[in-house]
Image (spheres, grey):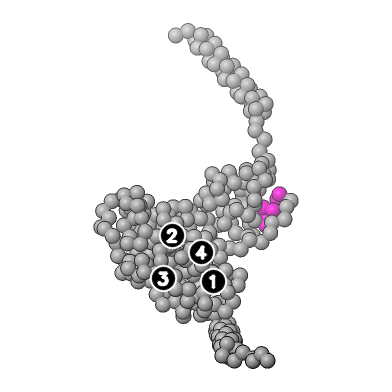
Amino acid sequence: MDFVALVTAGGVLAGVGAAAAALLAVASRVFAVQVDERITAIAAVLPGANCGGCGFPGCSGYAAAIVNKGVDPSLCAPAGADAAKKIGAIMGVEVPDREKVIARVRCGGGHDKCKPRFEYRGLKTCRGAVMLNEGGAKSCPYGCEGLGDCVDVCVFDAIRMGEDGIPVVDMEKCTGCGKCVTACPKDVIELQACKGPVAINCNSQWKGKEVKNVCEVGCITCLACVKACPWEAITMKGNIPVIDYDKCHACGLCVDSCKPGSIVILRAIDEAAKEEGQKIIADRKAAAAAAKAAAAAAAAKPAPVQE
């Protein structure tokens, strides 16, 4: 082979390579996409879990949305309030404090408390059971299926399946990202205030007799908890009690009043508040009894004789 031809071919290739490199260098400058430094700074603050709880595709997507679309800087539950403050500082805005929320499994009807309607032998997924039969395999159509869809989606290892077939949330690990809420096909899981000392452990919208027939620990809509609360922190939403934690004093009287045990204790009960609550209820009963007696006396009093 001609040596000169080889050298010439090599030189041509080198020249083409150099020209292409120069062209690419120019193109990279001309068509370069400028990345806002704030996006990089915010992404560094975020935990990098890419859980999607904020509603955006990963932490980088959320960071870009904050800068480019003015999205709320406090949507990242795993990052917490401190990170939200840092993001606010980067954006030059003030971020108000947001109360921490965690996932609550609103069902206590485990295998021994709420029997299945039929034996489910399909894929081990709650969604599969619900798709097979409306209401799932549980006798209570509002109850937890116990097949672990919520456990599978939790990237923080904050949920494990209990021995009774009901998921257990680790309140310390839970970040309130909401992925388990989305994964549950029966809306059994809800994000609630982390500070709550007690919780309603039932999700059924059936009435008392219907609930009794299928679950030993389901709410029977007796209203005993509503009447027992001295601070009117419990109201009914449909057939389920709802607790206003801003009013709750952690007295535990609602727990004592609940016959089926549908209300559970999450934190230590405040004994002083319990004593105060008992006094308030006693005073109300005494006042009601006195008013009733006065009304009865007035009704029994003979009418004045007119002359």
The disc labelled 3 sits on which kind of residue?
Answer: Ile
Q: Which mark is residue 188?
A: 2
Residue under numbered circle 4: 237
Residue 139 sits above or below residue 28 on the image: below
Q: Indicate the secondary structure of the residue bearing disc 3.
A: loop
Q: How would you rate the neighbour count of disc 3 (Cα within 10 Å): few for under 14, some for 14-19, many for 20 or more?
A: many
Q: Residue, x 56% and y 65% (percent of image)?
A: 193
The magenta-colored residue range is 85-91
User: At which x and y percent is residue 64?
Assistant: 62, 43
The earlier-in-sequence mark between 4 and 2 is: 2
Mark 4 and mark 3: Cα distance apart in space: 13 Å
Which of the two residues, 253 or 9, is positioned nearer the viewer here? 253
**x 47%, y 66%: residue:** 240
Q: Position of residue 176 (x, y in %)?
A: 53, 59
Q: Earlier in the sequence, mark 2 or mark 1?
A: 2
* 305 relative to 132 in the view: left or right: right
The residues bearing labels 3 and 1 have C-alpha atoms spaced at a distance of: 15 Å
**Magenta-drawn stretch, dominant element (helix, strand or loop):** helix
Rendered residue at 38%/64% (across/down): 166
Local secondary structure at mark 4 = strand
CA gap between label 2 and label 3 equals 17 Å
- Find disc 1 in the rendering and name its residue: 234
How far, Cα to Cα, is label 4 from label 1?
Answer: 10 Å
Residue at the spot of label 3: 220
Residue 61 within the magenta-colored segment of the rendering: no
For the N terminus, which image quadrant? top left
Can residue 143 be seen here? The reply is: yes
